[in-house]
Structures are given as structure tokens and as C-alpha cells.
């Protein structure tokens, strides 16, 4: 079977979707020697190598028109010419109308990570809302299999887009093997110095954008007793995203005691040590299709407080404390409780490690491969 994969999001400094694409491809290549793979990349990626892999670097461009030209003209021609059985898009985008492909000659599998732009449109730019709606609706119309990251996303997808003729398959994401409790004092000190971290702190990791509810976290944090805020500053780690200016402005106005520190984007290799240094990890996001950071924090043995909404209960289970992200008082109470209760910290750390161990990328890759091969068998049956 010939399987083509859109790997354009696999780049240095990759986002959550890029991390997903990279790890899925790596897992497929480690596990599967039966099928032939064609991987489209926007930049060379030497670490991805296998005897059954052919890589193609396409012109990388941030211009929307050029990207759509590749998806809708060049890609369908390539799939037809090489008689590709299954095309897998890990990041929403499929050809709008595959007019260069014989009917039934290539099956399409797509991952729809979330439908947040439909649920919380005010937290995105107009451009993102328009494009995401187009991508999602086209994917639902065209795909032979749809993969989602959580039962929560599946429910919302079916509620918003209606019953789909194709299967919607839940394949949970996973935590990378590099996310373990960092014990090396030299590396811990290096990361502490690099980000000017205090001895003890409350940690948030995520892009600074409205959906992450960072101002809600800051308001809740300011409800803590002054003595706790002195001992445990709030460290906000993440790149600046869309609609960030009002968030940064409110953070500045709330930070009357200089106990809230924004340290910017953290390098991927620094994250395990960053999590390991924290006293508690707090992630009060309004909505997540899955939510990597709480899982990464649990894998590093950090007590986790997160939202009781969307997919986050599926990820954290009973291994963390879950609260209404819009209830500042409840969030503050939970943070104070964890910071003051050593036994609770120990329990949450143990449960988090056990919970995170269930989410392995090889399992995610195996489940994805089964879906791709199922679509390919459908293609073979249609050809007979």
C-alpha cells in the first residue's frame, strides 16, 4: 500500500500540530515496514529516515495562495501519477476538489484536532475563523476517515457539523519519551538560570492568547495570601499569540507586587526541566481539543490543576484537580490547597506519573496505522 502524508508542519520550533505530525510519522516508520510512504516536507528533516520512505521538499511559503495551489493542483496530480492509496493530512487541510484524481483512486484520512473556532470564535482572529471553517467543512465533506484527538472533539464535531457518512475515530495524543522528571542538578540549574526562575513557583505553559485564560489565572493568583505569592511567584511561559496585547496589558495591571513573571517561549529541550522545577502546574484553558501541557507536566511528576471542560478531564482523569476555568475563586482555592498540602502534592505527583504512562506515542501511531490501512482496504475493494 502507498501512503502519502502531509508533513509541512514538521519544522523547527514546531507547534502542537507540528509535534503531532512529527511523532506520528516517526511512530509509523518505526512500526511499519509493509507499506511505502511518501512524505511532503516544507524543509529538509534528516532525522526522519526509513527504507520505505521517500521524502519531497516542497517550496515553503507563508502565503496562503501558494499553499492552496499546492494542495489543490500539484498534490492531486502527484497522488494520481504515483497511484497513492491513502493520503493522510495530520493538520486539517485537504484538496478542495480533487478533480485530477480518478473517483475512488485515493482515499483521504484527515485529523481534525478541534472545532474551537466554532465554539469560541471571539478568541480567534477573523482570518483564522474563516479559514478554519473552510478547512473543517471541506475535510468533513471529502475525507473517508476522520481522526479526532478526544471524545470531546468528536461530540462537538458531530453536534456542529451533523452526522458524517464516514467513521469519526478517536485516537488520543500522547506524551513524548523526553518528558520525565529531570534529576540532573546541572541541567536544572541551567534552565533555572536561563529563564531567571525563582526557587519555587506556580507554572503556566502555553501560547499567550485569549483561549488559554491567562488573565483568569492571574486574577485567581492575586487572590492568594501575600505570603504565598512571595514564596511562589507565578511564571508564565509561552510565545505571544493572537489578541495578546490586551492580555499582556491586564497582566501588567494585575502584577502590583511583581510576583507574576512572563519568561517568554521556552525551547523544547528545556521543558522537562522547567516542569520539574515547578511546585504546581496550572492550566485553566477555556477549551482544548486535547491539551498537551497538562499531560507533559504529569509525566514530569508535577501536581496539575486544570479545567473541568472540553477534553481536559479525558487527559487528566483523577490524577489532577479540575475546576471551572471561569471561577477565579475556585481556582485560587485549588492553588492554595496544593501549595499548602505536602501530602496532596505527593499524591497528585504519583497519580500524574501513573496517568501519563498510559499515553504513549507508539500506541497512537498503531491506532493511526490501523485507520490508514482500513481506508486503503476500502480503496482496494472499490477497485475490484
Image (cartoon, rainbow, N blue to C red):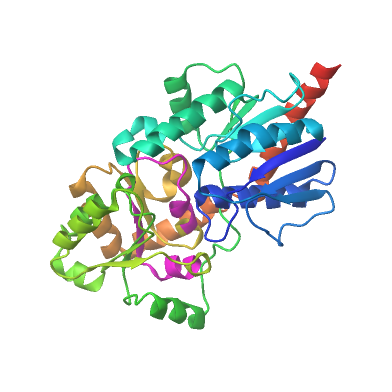
Q: Residue at x 50, y 25 (%)?
A: 137
In this rendering, would 281 be left or right of 272?
A: left
Residue 287, percent from left and from top: 37, 40
How many marks on residues?
0
Q: Nearer the viewer, residue 234 or 162?
A: 162
Q: Residue at x 15, y 57 (%)?
A: 223
In the image, the segment drawn in magenta is 271-296
Identity of the residue furthest to the bottom in this view? 186
Residue 238, percent from left and from top: 38, 60
Q: Residue at x 50, y 50 (%)?
A: 16
Quarter the N terminus occupies: top right
Residue 128, percent from left and from top: 40, 38
Q: Nearer the viewer, residue 146 or 240?
A: 240
Q: Is residue 323 above or below residue 178?
A: above
Is residue 357 something one can see in this rendering?
Answer: yes
Quarter where residue 66 is shown: top right
Q: Is 289 colored magenta in this rendering?
A: yes
In this rendering, would 383 be left or right of 19?
A: right
Quarter the C terminus occupies: top right
Is residue 358 something one can see in this rendering?
Answer: no
Q: Is residue 380 above or below residue 233?
A: above
Q: Is 371 colored magenta in this rendering?
A: no
In this rendering, would 362 be left or right of 256?
A: right
Q: Is residue 105 above or below residue 265?
A: above
Residue 221, percent from left and from top: 21, 58
Q: Residue at x 44, y 76 (%)?
A: 191
Amino acid at each position: 500500500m502507498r501512503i502519502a502524508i502531509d508533513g509541512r508542519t514538521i519544522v523547527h520550533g514546531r507547534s502542537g500540530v507540528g509535534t503531532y505530525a512529527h511523532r506520528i510519522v516517526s511512530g509509523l516508520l518505526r512500526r511499519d515496514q509493509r507499506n511505502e510512504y511518501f512524505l511532503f516536507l516544507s524543509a529538509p528533516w534528516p532525522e526522519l529516515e526509513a527504507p520505505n520512505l521517500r521524502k519531497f521538499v516542497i517550496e515553503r511559503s507563508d502565503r496562503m495562495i501558494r499553499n492552496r495551489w499546492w494542495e489543490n493542483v500539484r498534490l492531486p496530480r502527484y497522488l494520481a501519477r504515483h497511484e497513492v492509496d491513502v493520503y493522510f493530512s495530520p493538520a486539517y487541510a485537504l484538496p478542495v476538489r480533487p478533480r485530477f484524481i480518478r473517483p475512488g483512486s485515493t482515499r483521504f484520512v484527515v485529523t481534525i484536532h478541534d472545532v474551537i473556532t466554532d465554539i469560541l470564535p471571539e478568541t480567534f482572529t477573523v482570518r483564522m475563523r474563516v479559514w478554519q471553517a473552510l478547512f473543517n467543512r471541506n475535510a468533513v465533506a471529502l475525507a473517508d476517515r476522520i481522526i479526532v484527538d478526544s471524545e470531546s472533539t468528536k461530540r462537538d464535531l458531530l453536534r456542529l457539523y451533523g452526522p458524517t457518512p464516514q467513521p469519526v475515530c478517536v485516537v488520543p495524543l500522547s506524551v513524548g519519551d523526553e518528558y520525565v522528571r529531570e534529576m540532573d542538578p546541572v541541567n536544572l540549574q541551567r534552565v533555572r538560570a536561563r529563564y531567571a526562575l525563582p526557587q519555587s513557583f506556580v507554572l503556566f505553559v502555553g501560547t499567550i492568547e485569549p483561549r488559554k485564560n491567562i488573565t483568569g489565572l492571574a486574577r485567581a493568583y492575586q487572590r492568594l495570601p501575600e505570603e504565598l505569592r512571595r514564596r511562589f511567584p507565578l511564571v508564565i511561559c509561552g510565545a505571544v499569540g493572537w489578541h495578546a496585547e490586551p492580555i499582556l496589558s491586564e497582566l501588567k495591571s494585575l502584577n502590583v507586587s511583581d510576583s507574576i513573571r512572563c519568561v517568554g517561549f521556552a525551547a523544547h529541550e528545556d521543558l522537562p526541566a522547567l516542569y520539574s522545577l515547578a511546585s504546581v502546574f496550572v492550566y485553566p484553558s477555556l477549551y482544548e481539543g486535547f491539551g498537551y501541557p497538562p499531560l507533559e507536566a504529569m509525566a514530569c511528576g508535577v501536581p496539575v490543576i486544570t479545567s473541568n471542560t472540553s477534553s481536559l478531564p479525558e487527559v487528566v482523569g483523577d490524577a489532577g484537580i479540575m475546576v471551572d476555568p471561569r471561577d477565579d475563586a475556585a481556582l485560587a482555592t485549588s492553588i492554595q490547597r496544593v501549595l499548602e498540602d505536602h501530602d496532596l502534592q505527593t499524591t497528585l505527583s504519583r497519580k500524574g506519573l501513573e496517568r501519563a504512562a498510559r499515553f504513549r506515542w507508539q500506541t497512537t501511531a498503531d491506532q493511526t496505522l490501523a485507520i490508514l490501512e482500513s481506508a486503503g482496504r476500502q480503496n482496494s475493494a472499490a477497485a475490484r
